[in-house]
Amino acid sequence: MPRVPTFEAPALPRLAESLNALTVEELKWYVAALPGKAPTRKGELVEMVSSALSNPSYLRELWAKLSEGQGQVISEVVYNLKGIYDPEVIEAKYPLVSQPAKPQSYYGYFGRDKKVEASAFDLFFYYGNYIGRHIPSDLVELLRTFIPYPPALAMASQAEPPAAVLDPDDLDPDDP
């Protein structure tokens, strides 16, 4: 009997792997959102971000800075999306929350856009070539110790059906 190929999502990288994959300029973008003076060497930049985000009390401080919608997005990614940010799902469920920003690459054919500073929300997300935007696995584990589950999806309903249903054939096409 032939085997059906199965797709396995790649494992989420740990925070150190995600940080080491970044350039120095990208790391400086993340570090600018942290308190303290930014170091200049890549290893020191990685250590600064890694130690800040591995500290449960600092992670709680970051969580407190998020808007309600941003917190719900992170909860959704952590609990329901296995750490991977799916823009289609998130945009459908949380249309008022903008996507996390990402560091602007030094390389660009058309030049640079307006520089965007990293926020507390952006510190949770990293980018990997094979999995896209994600929250690193060790950060997911830490977040699960204190963040709430995302709200259940709810749809408003009525006890009674509407009084009248319009027939599309009765509508005047010229009437806006």
Image (cartoon, rainbow, N blue to C red):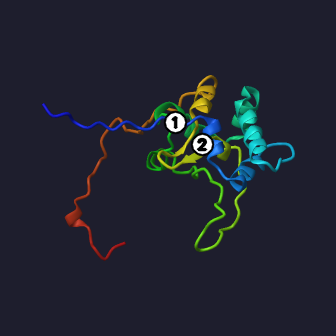
How far across and how far down the image is residue 82, in percent?
48, 34
Q: Residue at x 63, y 26 (%)?
A: 142
Which quadrant of the figure has residue 168?
bottom left
How far separated are the C-alphas under marks 1 and 2? 24 Å
Which residue is most to the left? 1
- Sequence-earlier tag: 1 or 2: 1
Q: Position of residue 24 (x, y in %)?
A: 72, 53
Q: The residue tagged with tag 2: helix, strand or loop?
A: helix
Q: Quadrant of the C terminus?
A: bottom left
Q: Which residue is mark 2?
A: 69
Q: Nearer the viewer, residue 164 or 31?
A: 31
- Of all residues, the one furthest to the top in this rendering is 145
Q: Secondary structure at mark 1?
A: loop
Q: Left or right? Give the position of 171 relative to 121.
A: left
Give the residue drawn at x 44%, y 45%.
89
Residue pointed to by mark 1? 12
Check disc 1: other Cα within 10 Å, few if <14, some if 14-19, many if 20+: many
Residue at 57% x, 51% y: name it.
99
Q: How many marks?
A: 2
